[in-house]
Amino acid sequence: MKTRLSVNINKIATLRNARGANTPDVLKAALDCERYGAEGITVHPRPDERHIKYNDVLLLSEVVSTEFNIEGYPTKNFIDLVLKTKPAQCTLVPDAENVITSNQGWDTLKQKDFLTGIIEQLQSNGIRVSLFVDPIEQFIEGAKMVNADCIELYTGPFARIFNTDKHKAIEPYIQSAKYAQSLELKFNAGHDLNLDNLAFFKKNILFTSEVSIGHALICDALYYGLENTIQMYLRQLK
Ligand code: PXP
């Protein structure tokens, strides 16, 4: 089964924001990623706009022609932005405001009522909803209960254990992916995936719908160039 590569372009915006002008150009980078083979573009607007800005998301929504995925914590401003831009997919993430990067998935049981309402609102606007979750059965079952279309498994722990014991690292993800499949939930994965661990992940979980990759891919692009790097990541998914 084909696994889509969605490139998270937040880091491009971080680099641009460091100087205040428009270099590198986030819109151009998104279009170039698509031209080089990316099958989706992901952005993660945070309330402080330290990476991608809300206005970037508005502009990107007009030009991205592959799958546009907006991820983030569902504040009122975030939901308004998503409803205005109507991406193909919205990935809800339970980020606390000041975290450096996402570091855990939803407790879909505790947050059941909160998530149910938001998911309903997004879906009624034609937006597919994915929930960022840890590879824990009860939270995946909870994702089904709140009627999510999809889960994105948080692969940070996989990446951390990968170098010491890759078989141990992948095991909970194999089980979780099978469980999600049995519930007819689509299954995405993201966080800390890179050229070392991606092929192993894909080989073990062939029916992954999508991987969302930012930090490592943009870092690799410094050495290999964006076009080559995207090709290298696509090859890992073959
Ligand atoms: N998925 C989610 C929910 C994220 O928050 C991030 C980071 O913004 C990613 C995937 C991509 O992680 P990375 O930058 O480590 O590839």
Image (cartoon, grey):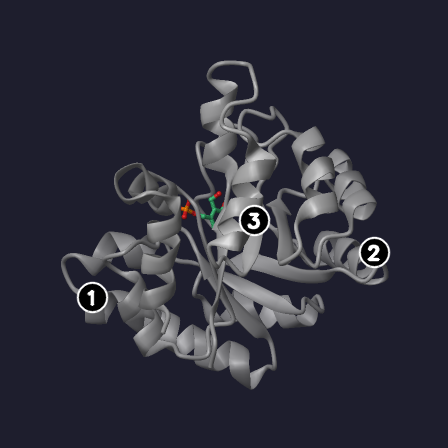
Q: Quarter-wise, where is residue 112 in the image?
A: bottom right
Residue sitting at 71 percent across and 37 percent down?
59
Sequence order check: which comes first, mark 1 or mark 2?
Answer: 2
User: Which residue is the site of mark 1?
Assistant: 166
Residue named by callout 2: 121
* Mark closest to the chain's N terminus, 3 or 1: 3
Q: Secondary structure at mark 1?
A: helix
Depth check, front residue: 100 or 36: 36
Task: Name the residue at 63% across, 29% down.
Answer: 53
Single out the residue that lies furthest toward the bottom: 182
On the picture, is 122 further left or further right than 26?
right
Q: Is mark 3 within 8 Å of ligand 1?
A: yes
Front residue of this view, candidates 193 and 163: 193
Residue at point 71% right, 30% down? 55
Please identify the residue farthest to the top as the structure is shown.
20
Q: Are marks 1 and 2 in contact (CB under 8 Å)?
A: no
Q: Between residues 126 and 154, which one lies in front from this camera angle?
A: 126
Q: Position of residue 177 (x, y in %)?
A: 45, 75
Whichever of callouts 3 and 2 sits on the residue coming sooner in the sequence is 3
Q: Mark 3 or 1, which is nearer the eye? A: 3
Q: Tell me if I can see residue 23 in this picture.
A: yes
Report the side of 74 relative to 40 (left or right): right
Q: Quadrant of residue 144?
A: bottom right
Asked if 13 appears above or below 105 in the picture, the reply is above
Query: To which quarter of the image does residue 132 belong?
Result: bottom right
Q: Are the residues at dot 3 and dot 2 in contact (C-beta closer than 8 Å)? A: no
Q: In the image, residue 237 lies at what x, y percent?
A: 37, 69
> What's the residue type where badge 2 is placed?
Gln
Please name the residue that numbered disc 3 is placed on: 42
Residue type at tag 3: Thr
Q: Secondary structure at mark 3?
A: strand
